[in-house]
Amino acid sequence: MWIYQILVSLFSRLSPLFALVNSKFRKQLRGQINSLNQLTNFSRKGRLVWIHVASLGEYEQALPIIDKIKQKQTEAQIALSFFSPSGYEYAAKKAPVDFVFYLPWDTKSKANKVVQWLRPDVAIFVKYELWPNYLNELKKFGCPTYLVAARFYKDQWLFKYRLGKQLLENFNQILCQDESSISVLHSFYPELSVEYCGDTRFDRVAQIALENKPLDSIESFISGRKCVVFGSSWQEEHELLAQSLREFDDPKVCFIVAPHKVDAITTQKTISIFSEPVNKYTQSEFQSERRVLILDTVGLLSKVYRYADLAFIGGGFKTGLHNVPEAAVYGIPVLIGPNYNQFPEVVQLVKSGGVIAINQSSDLDIYLQTLAKQPRALQSQGETNRKFIEQNLGASDKVYQEISKFL
């Protein structure tokens, strides 16, 4: 533990130097300083739930829990903290909570200040967030703490040491998002209190699907054609699609490409991969004869999937697979790259036949031809995905049942 204290103190002191050469560190440092100032002015008015997430992905997992608390405890306040600038910047103005802040570095002094200023009634940490000093301070303060949507793997080195057990012992309850995580954790520490709660992402994607807000520009682009959406895609997926499009020429099928990174350089690089003119979402008007639309903006992808007849989720070739349930909830077949075994929900979807792992453009060609000529052949695969999502709803209810004991 003393090694951790030295390292985190060192990082905290060196962060101004890192900020000089790295824009992400610069945003983080500025945000942490501002948050410490804002925390002193934060006014508690009743019961307070503190939820901490690392970044945007964990925020999406926290949203169904936030909504459940707001439904059931209308007087309760919610404070939401981030460690990553990307998550904070996205959620700061739109998160349905009372207070959003950057989590300062996990030094003893800063952890003590944050806990004493917030004085939470319940603290929730999402997925992998394990901060020793914050957990120790919460325990001293007498605040119940929960680790939710937790996942564990056999090769996680931290839990082979005493520090790992000390961290997990600070939680009143650990709620895992899959059964295999419970088995793994019990193989490390059989005596820990662990329960299955499920994955709150399923609740989140179902919630988005119910909103059903039309996107006029997307509808205008599709204009009655079959639509394939490449979501959170990387260069490997763009090259795969570009290669298939050189042979596939059916005018009744169009493509929406939503790159994982959205900036001018990445967008231009994506456009250059295709050997045909494409539309950009941020353009004022679309050329109706073009069959590819680049979604060069953020915040729309989860809503765009509702227009898809087939989806390809990026990251499965090299970088790490992205959010498959986000597309599967709409009852459409989903294609992915070959690297998915670290995602239990995707493994199950592949086994059930609703998600298909492919390796090369010829595999993609088969599905494009099927979509163009025999679209009904894909309906049963899509329906498999819809049923899987429906069968796995309710994780946020289970989390709320646990924390409601203290609200």
Image (cartoon, rainbow, N blue to C red):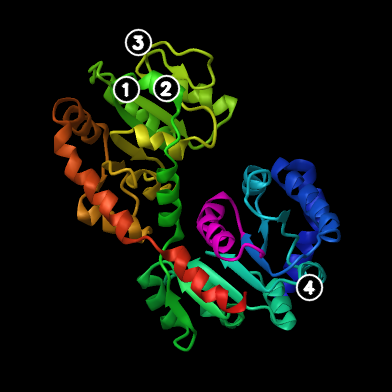
| Residue carrying label 4 | 108
Label 2, on which residue?
293
- Relative image position of residue 333 (x, y in whole percent): 26, 42
Q: Which residue is mark 1?
A: 254
Residue located 50% across and 57% down the image = 64
SS for callout 4: helix
The residue under the point 23% across, 47% down is 383
Which of 151/80 is in front?
A: 80
Name above or below for residue 266 compared with residue 314: above
Q: Is residue 9 left or right of residue 234?
A: right
Q: Which residues are magenta?
A: 53-76
Alpha-carbon distance for marks 4 and 2?
50 Å
Seen in the picture, residue 9 relative to 28 is either above or below; the reply is below
Residue annotated with mark 3? 289
303 in the magenta segment: no
Q: Which mark is residue 263?
A: none
Quadrant housing the C terminus: bottom right
Query: How far apart are the alpha carbons under marks 1 and 3?
Result: 10 Å
By secondary structure, the bulk of the magenta-drawn segment is best described as: helix
Q: Marks 3 and 4, how far apart in space?
A: 61 Å
Q: Is residue 116 left or right of residue 187?
A: right
Front-most of residues 105 and 53: 53
Name the element at disc 3. loop
